[in-house]
Amino acid sequence: MAARRVSATLILVLAVSGALFVVLTGGHRLSAADDAASRGYDVANLDRTCKPCDDFHQFAVGGWLKANPIPPEYPLWGSFVTLQEKNQQALRGILEAASANASAAAGSNEQKIGDFYASCMDTKSIDAQGLQPISADLAAIDAIHDTAGLLDAGAHLQTQGVGVLFAFGSDQDFKDSSQVIGAPAARSGLCGNWKVH
């Protein structure tokens, strides 16, 4: 179930990324490196010193493994990790361009995305505010003295999108993949380890 959620999250991120790319760049390529030569299988990835019948994995990807050692800051490395890295770079480029575009039409997606990104990157203002933006919630938590108070504070935080006691989500119906259904409730937050029920 967790693997399906990770896969669904990855698909959602890629879909949103693609939509942002099309909306903000008009579908233009990000760089010349994104041409046909950078897609598909590259025969340079083969290790022709190894016979395919002796060790097919080494034969098929040995050249890539030799040319792409695991960087020290990563626990693993592969084509999907490089894809994720490229995607993160593309998204960052889109967000930085949107936040730098002072001439974006008011109310446009580019203006909204740019303003949101700029506000998240304004760490001086964030640090200056400290805990003030959540002070009311912290005071409500501090005022909990019994079960009823816990339930009241938990219910309020749930309405704010904080999964204090439980969380809900959605997933594909296992019996009909054309349908998206409510996923089972999952405990979260103060209830210990995340677990689906």
Image (cartoon, helix red, strand yellow):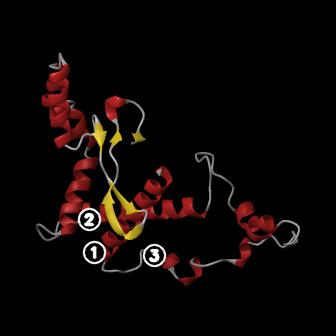
| Residue 129 visible | no
Q: Secondary structure at mark 3?
A: loop
23 vs 74, left or right, is left
Q: What residue is drawn where x is 47% and y is 52%?
A: 1
Residue 14: image location, x then y, percent:
41, 66
139 vs 194, left or right, is left
Residue 127: image location, x then y, percent:
25, 34
* Residue 189 figure quarter: top left
Q: CA distance from mark 1 to mark 3?
A: 17 Å
Tag in front: 1 or 3: 1
| Residue 58 visible | yes
Quarter of the picture containing the C terminus is top left
Q: Secondary structure at mark 1?
A: helix
Q: Amino acid at mark 2?
A: Ala
**Badge 1: how crowded within 10 Å, few (<14), some, or many (20+)?**
few
Q: Which residue is mark 3?
A: 31
* Residue 23 figure quarter: bottom left
Q: Secondary structure at mark 2?
A: helix
Q: Is residue 150 above or below residue 54?
A: above
> Which disc, if any, is residue 23?
1
Numbered marks: total: 3
**Badge 3: how crowded within 10 Å, few (<14), some, or many (20+)?**
few
92 vs 74, left or right, is left
Residue 100: image location, x then y, percent:
25, 62
Q: Which residue is mark 2?
A: 98
Q: CA distance from mark 1 to mark 2?
A: 11 Å
Q: CA distance from mark 2 to mark 3?
A: 17 Å
Q: Nearer the viewer, residue 121 or 143?
A: 143
Tag in front: 1 or 2: 1
Residue 54: image location, x then y, percent:
88, 67
